[in-house]
């Protein structure tokens, strides 16, 4: 398989875990280059459900190597918990099949506190974050005061840098008594000790993989509209979730990438605050009533709406998407009609692409095209031609309007509930 970048085309939760799991069959190495344990990828193996937050889902495939790249923000305690959880369920995790970049930044306890405070702080914008400390960790990275995995490998340096960061915390944080340098250092350094076998210069190890002719899959976390540059700012995460994030976040030149796959749900969902033009309360109620659309990281009910091709059209442009994977098609199975958002109306002007300002996003109303539903279960369908004609028409129409052809349609959570075109 060629080197593939996989991204989410919407606001995350597109079902990337399953598509990654599927593409991993053809890859030798699976790499993550951004985000942290704010992500949650669900993989169903047989009757067992695995939710991964930091470790690439390739770990579920014996013989594949997984890499956590330099662009990821890493909570070492959370990573160990994830490793231990997998080990307890019989999944092998060793220095052979998991590598962690020595230059990845560390999520510290005070990052989580700052994240939570910003969410409740007066005068600030409530983003609806996962409260995993992601924004403040990337903030420290950009401000050049972050702590990294390589620091964790050198206790003296780690303790010195940690003391400096704690001294710099706001009074209010210090007053909580939660940020004692010695206590944090003890917990983190113990985690660091256990993580040692996994730590590597992943830029060089990935280059060696490439030179050996092995293929790599770069799994994106979150989605295009949570991208710090291209998303619905400020209602975004703090990393580049679009295709470019894979090259900087893993240390690989863009010319080494062969294709970009975007995953889009057959409708749209979002967790957290921020505008959502194609949102539909009745659709949300329907999915929640079916027990669908609850977040895998925070358990929050996702907001739901119709498929929005203004978003996916832009996602295709911004990441140079070659092909689309459409997931959760079965979620629409029993509807008499399905709507597609084909454009936005902004104060009487028709927009084919999203606006820049969040205030304009909030004022956009959807322009819908309505198609007949198929009212037949697609869950057992395994061949594209066997899909009901109206379901095929729907898939083809959303892909046509988005500007990229479909290569895969998912009709259920199980590994085999997948139709390859
Ligand atoms: P943060 O990444 O925790 O800072 O949260 C920023 C925004 O991104 C919030 O709206 C979160 O709900 C959203 N977000 C972060 N990670 C994910 C994800 O994996 N799926 C969906 N939304 C996410």
Image: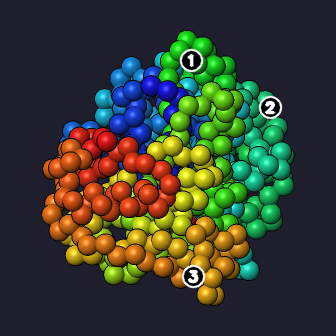
Toward the top, the furthest residue is 212
Q: Which mark is in front, 1 or 2? A: 1
Q: Nearer the viewer, residue 1 or 56?
A: 1
Up/down of 357 relative to 412, above or below: below
Query: Which of the 4 quarters of the picture holds residue 375?
Result: bottom left
Q: Quadrant of residue 156?
A: top right
**Disc 3, SS:** strand
Q: Residue at position x 75%, y 54% from top?
A: 139
Looking at the image, tell me whether mark 1 or mark 2 is earlier in sequence order: 2
How far apart marks 1 and 2 lie (CA) works out to: 31 Å
Callout 1 environment at 10 Å: few (<14), some (14 to 19), or many (20+)? some
Give the CA separation, mark 1 to mark 3: 48 Å
The reply to whether the residue tagged 3 has its Cβ within 8 angstroms of ligand 1 is: no
The residue that label 2 is drawn on is: 157
Nearer-the-camera pick, 338 or 88: 338
The disc placed on residue 209 is 1
Query: Which mark is on residue 345?
Result: 3
Residue 173's x, y, as percent?
73, 63
């Amino acid at each position: 398989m060629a080197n593939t970048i996989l991204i989410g085309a919407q606001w995350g939760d597109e079902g990337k875990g399953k598509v990654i799991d599927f593409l991993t069959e053809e890859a030798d190495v699976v790499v993550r280059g951004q985000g942290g344990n704010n992500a949650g990828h669900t993989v169903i193996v047989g009757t067992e459900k695995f939710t991964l937050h930091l470790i690439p889902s390739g770990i579920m495939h014996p013989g594949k190597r997984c890499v956590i790249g330099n662009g990821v923000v890493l909570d070492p305690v959370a990573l160990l918990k994830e490793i231990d959880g997998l080990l307890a369920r019989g999944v092998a995790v060793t220095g052979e099949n998991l590598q962690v970049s020595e230059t990845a930044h560390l999520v510290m306890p005070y990052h989580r506190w700052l994240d939570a405070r910003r969410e409740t702080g007066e005068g600030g914008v409530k983003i609806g974050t996962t409260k995993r400390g992601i924004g403040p960790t990337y903030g420290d990275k950009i401000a050049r005061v972050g702590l990294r995995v390589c620091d964790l490998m050198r206790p003296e340096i780690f303790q010195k840098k940690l003391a400096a960061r704690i001294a710099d915390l706001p009074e209010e944080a210090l007053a909580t008594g939660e940020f004692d340098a010695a206590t944090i250092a003890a917990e983190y350094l113990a985690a660091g000790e256990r993580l040692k076998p996994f730590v590597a210069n992943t830029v060089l190890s990935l280059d060696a993989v490439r030179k050996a002719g092995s293929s790599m899959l770069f799994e994106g976390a979150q989605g295009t509209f949570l991208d710090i540059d291209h998303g619905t700012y400020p209602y975004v995460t703090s990393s580049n979730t679009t295709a470019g994030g894979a090259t900087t976040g893993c240390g690989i030149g863009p010319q080494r990438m062969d294709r970009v796959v975007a995953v889009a749900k057959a409708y749209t969902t979002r967790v957290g605050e921020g505008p959502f033009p194609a949102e539909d309360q009745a659709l949300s109620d329907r999915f929640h009533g079916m027990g669908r659309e609850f977040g895998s990281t925070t358990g929050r009910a996702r907001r739901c709406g119709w498929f929005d091709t203004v978003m996916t059209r832009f996602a295709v442009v911004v990441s140079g998407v070659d092909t689309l994977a459409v997931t959760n098609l079965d979620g629409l199975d029993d509807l008499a009609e399905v709507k597609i958002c084909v454009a936005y109306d902004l104060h009487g002007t028709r927009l084919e692409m999203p606006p820049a300002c969040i205030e304009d996003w909030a004022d956009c109303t959807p322009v819908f095209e309505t198609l007949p539903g198929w009212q037949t279960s697609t869950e057992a369908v395994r061949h594209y031609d066997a899909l009901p004609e109206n379901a095929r028409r729907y898939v083809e129409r959303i892909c046509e309007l988005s500007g990229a052809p479909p290569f895969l349609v998912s009709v259920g959570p199980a590994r085999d509930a997948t139709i390859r075109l």
